[in-house]
Amino acid sequence: MQLLHLEKQWVEELNKFLIIKEKPPIYKTKTGREKQRDNLIRIKSAVVAEELLELFFGN
């Protein structure tokens, strides 16, 4: 749970100075419903997320 909170903080901080002109991608759910991501920033690996948080916020 703590990692998810930190990832959310990291994304919020990046959004303060990043200018992204692309729309978030549309994807299909398991039921076939189309949804649009709320954000372009995605981190799939907890290890990578921890490293980025350490680099960004320090330790």
Image (cartoon, helix red, strand yellow):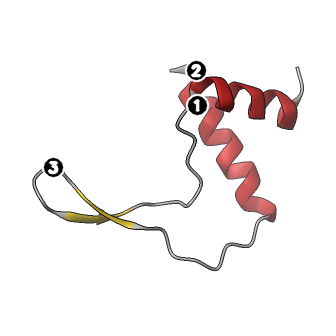
Quarter of the C terminus within the rendering = top right
Please give left or right for residue 12 compared with residue 59 in the image: left
Please, which residue is most extreme toward the left here? Answer: 31
> Viewer-proximal residue, 1 or 35?
35
Q: Is residue 40 above or below residue 13?
A: below
Looking at the image, tell me whether mark 1 or mark 3 is earlier in sequence order: 1
Task: Report helix, strand or loop for mark 2.
Answer: helix
Q: Position of residue 33 (x, y in %)?
A: 16, 63
Residues at badges 1 and 2 in contact (C-beta under 8 Å)?
yes
Q: Amino acid at mark 1?
A: His
Identify residue for label 3.
Answer: 30
**What is the crowding at mark 1: few (fewer than 14 residues within 10 Å), some, or many (at least 20)?**
few
**What is the crowding at mark 3: few (fewer than 14 residues within 10 Å), some, or many (at least 20)?**
few
Callout count: 3
Task: Report helix, strand or loop for mark 3.
Answer: loop
Q: Is residue 20 above or below residue 47?
A: below
